[in-house]
Amino acid sequence: MYIVIVGAGDIGTPLIEIATYGGNEVVVIEKDEERADYAASEYDALVLNANATNNETLEDAGIEDADALISTTDQDATNIMVCLLAQEYQVPNIVSVVHRPEHMDLFERIGVNVMQNPQRLIAEYLYRAVKRPSIVDYMRIGEQAEVFEIDVEANAPIAGKTLQQANDEGLLSEDVLIVAIERHGNDEPITPRGGTVIETDDLVTVYSAVGATPEVTDIFGHPEDH
């Protein structure tokens, strides 16, 4: 993909790393000279030290050929201006960070894919790391549902049982679904079936419509999460 990334700050920099390592053709626009120089020296990307709210800058970045534009600056006004300009060039996929919740509706009304308040998302992640230490990784879906990874302990009620047995015994409610299993010695994740046995030390990916509540994490042997 040909990706234009606006901003090389706290959000933009790791994005540049991910995008370039993924084999994409990346152009970065950063108006701060020091940040631009750093990005140019660290990543295999064309970096323009310029203002992205300028048509000439976007054209220098090859916006006409871009498959996607991602705006990551810390100013919502700048992000929305960049997105509006990208729409004029008919960029197929436009994504932006939105810092203030009251601006979400504006971005959505003009048809921009958004990521709301990344600082809050980080704060929630850190809080979860303390509150639910057993959870390796998680992603919220909607208001309540979550997908998370969790290790299966030796004392877990589900350990040694098939998914069908766990379901029959009421361990897995209709709100909880195990969607993948990573097991030591297996190169590929296991796709769970009714006859799949959950083993101690498995790393399971779980979808829970009610979130990663203590009642759910208890199934995998983590009462310390209460």
Image: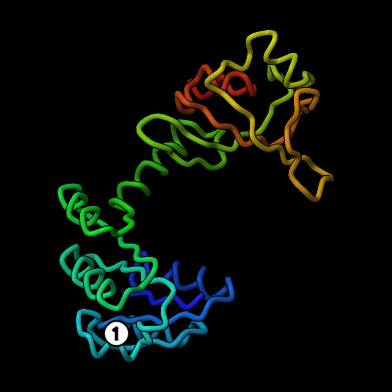
Q: Name the residue under label 1.
A: 58
Amino acid at circle 1: Leu
Left or right for 101, reference 155 = left
Residue 135: give x, y in percent of width and height.
55, 35
Q: How many marks?
A: 1
Residue 163: give x, y in percent of width and height.
73, 21
Residue name at image x 62 percent, y 17 percent: 172
Left or right for 171, reference 52 = right
Quick one: SS at disc 1?
A: helix
Residue 208 vertical position relative to residue 26 in the rendered view, above or below = above
Quadrant for residue 96, please give it: bottom left
Residue name at image x 60 percent, y 27 percent: 177
User: Looking at the image, which is closer to me, 101 or 11?
Assistant: 101
Residue 103 vertical position relative to residue 125 in the rendered view, above or below = below
Residue 84: give x, y in percent of width and height.
22, 70
Left or right for 142, reference 207 = left
Residue name at image x 51 percent, y 27 percent: 208
Quadrant for residue 89, please give it: bottom left
